[in-house]
Image: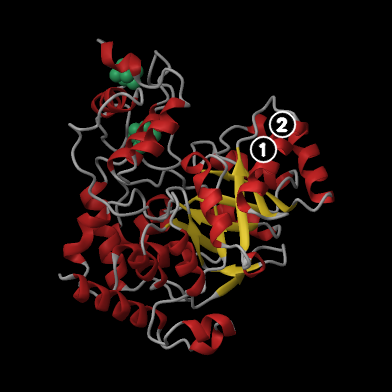
Amino acid sequence: MTAIDRREFLKQSARTAVGGVGVGLLPGAVRAAVEPEQPRVRRTVALGDTGLHISDIGFGSSRLRGDEGLVRFALERGISYFDTARSYTGGRSEETIGRALRGRRHEVVLASKIKVRADDTWQRVMSALEESLRSLQTDHIDVYFNHAVNDIERLANPEWHEFNARAKAQGKIRFAGMSGHGGNLVECLDYAVEHALVDVVLVGYNFGQDPAFYQRFTRSLDFVAVQSDLPAALARASGKGVGVVAMKTLRGARLNDMRPYESGGGTFAQAAFRWTLSNSDVDALIVTMKSPEMVEEYLGASGWLPPVRADVSLLDRYEARNGASQCRYGCNACATACPEGVPIAEVLRTRMYAEDYGDLELARADYAELGAGASPCLSCAHRACTGACPFGLDIPSLTSYAATKLRSSSSSMSSAPPPVTTGD
Ligand code: SF4
Ligand code: SF4
């Protein structure tokens, strides 16, 4: 498919997806800036009980490194929710968004994140927030997440509560949240919601974790969704008025693998988004966008439409192609499989950043936070983790690969297979 053909295909699939929803739903500034046939945001949603209204598809910026034009392109297409984190691209993500939104800050809802540890002080978190405010060139962040939470201790830290109270009182943040995609996500979500600690949650959620996907379409009891409790936890959060935003919706983002099969009027990414957004307990989703073409493709799924037969076929095929080689978000079934204490799921997530997302910088930065990481795998003779994955992943091979390729910034990925995807 040529570049022009592809662009036309994406536009066509966007039209198919929105089913005639009118341009009149768009804000005036956006309506004036965008031609009627261009892919754009078709639906805005209430974010829980916050009073905020955001586009159903938001701009994820975990790999944003200076492309202000891309941020403004997304804005012109109606995206009104921009998500970043202090740690993304070494601070460049926040800085880029700050420059891009200069003079237009009031048009968007801005979210950022910081990891609050179990022993952090409120002063340390406040200091990090102030750095983010400077980078983002704003006096407040709308939603400020405790980043990548996977244990209750980080939520129970009274210093985080103190920070939230002070930052809200000072007008530096409007709402508090937690983000997570680890094996203890459900437990953490329930704790945060039951203790009224959060206004918004950002969670890893996709078709591969949803029991309905397997029950409705594969009708196989061999596959059991590893986060079978997650939909119910999202319902409990939503029922309490907590805003729910989904991430990791593409289940690993091996997008290029799926191009040959996208003949039913939509793309794999659009199918995955529609699946996620068809859960009424999910308000919106974010996805990393790396190019205008990617923005256009992704916005083809904006609007209120459930997955259609062709979507399900794509999701099913994706599962069949990748099921035996992708670590599942939220699974931790192998947590105790390694006597050497290798955090297998975390290691495989960083490997995915390198191999599937093609982002070595992100992979190495996250791998560096894992301490020894998977280095014990390189000299492991017993390989006790073999067979520990119910999905058949060859854990020793995958972790050893990560240990070799990600262990230091001086190591080389030159021998790695080329990345096969274009986004997450
Ligand atoms: S390797 Fe297998 S068992 Fe371990 S977290 Fe990933 S999917 Fe689950
Ligand atoms: S290969 Fe050995 S060290 Fe590595 S995760 Fe498996 S059991 Fe642990």
Quarter of the N terminus within the rendering: bottom left
Cα–Cα span, label 2 and label 1: 6 Å
Q: Is residue 294 visible?
A: yes
Q: Label 1: how many residues lie within 10 Å, few (<14), some (14-19) or many (20+)?
A: some
Q: Nearer the viewer, residue 100 or 163?
A: 100
Question: What colour scheme governs how the chains and residues are painted in the rendered image of this protein?
Answer: secondary structure
Whole-percent x and y of residue 307?
38, 70
Residue 313: percent from left, percent from top: 26, 65
Residue drawn where x is 39% and y is 77% of the image: 39
Which amino acid type corresponds to the residue marked 2 in the rendered image? Arg
SS at circle 1:
helix
At horizontal 38% and vertical 29% (from top left) the residue drawn is: 347
Q: Say above or below: 375 vs 8.
A: above
Q: Callout 2: 10 Å neighbours few (<14), some, many (20+)?
A: few
Residue 228, placed above or below residue 346? below
Q: Position of residue 107 (x, y in %)?
A: 63, 70
- Seen as rendered, the residue at the extreme right is 169
Q: Quadrant of ligand 1?
A: top left
Residue ID for mark 1: 128
> Please, what is the three-letter code of the amino acid marked with disc 1?
Ala
Residue depicted at 38% across the width and 81% down the height: 38
Residue labelled 1 has its Cβ within 8 Å of some atom of ligand 1: no
Task: Tell me the quarter of the picture where residue 219 sits.
Answer: bottom left
Q: Where in the figure is residue 54, as x and y percent of width and height?
A: 60, 68
Say the numbered circle drawn on residue 160.
none
Q: Quadrant of residue 179?
A: top right
Verify CB contact (< 8 Å) between mark 2 and mark 1.
yes
Residue position marked by numbered label 2 in the rendering: 124
Left or right of residue 355: residue 279: right
Image position of 133 (left or right of 262): right
Secondary structure beneath label 2: helix
Q: Is residue 278 visible?
A: no
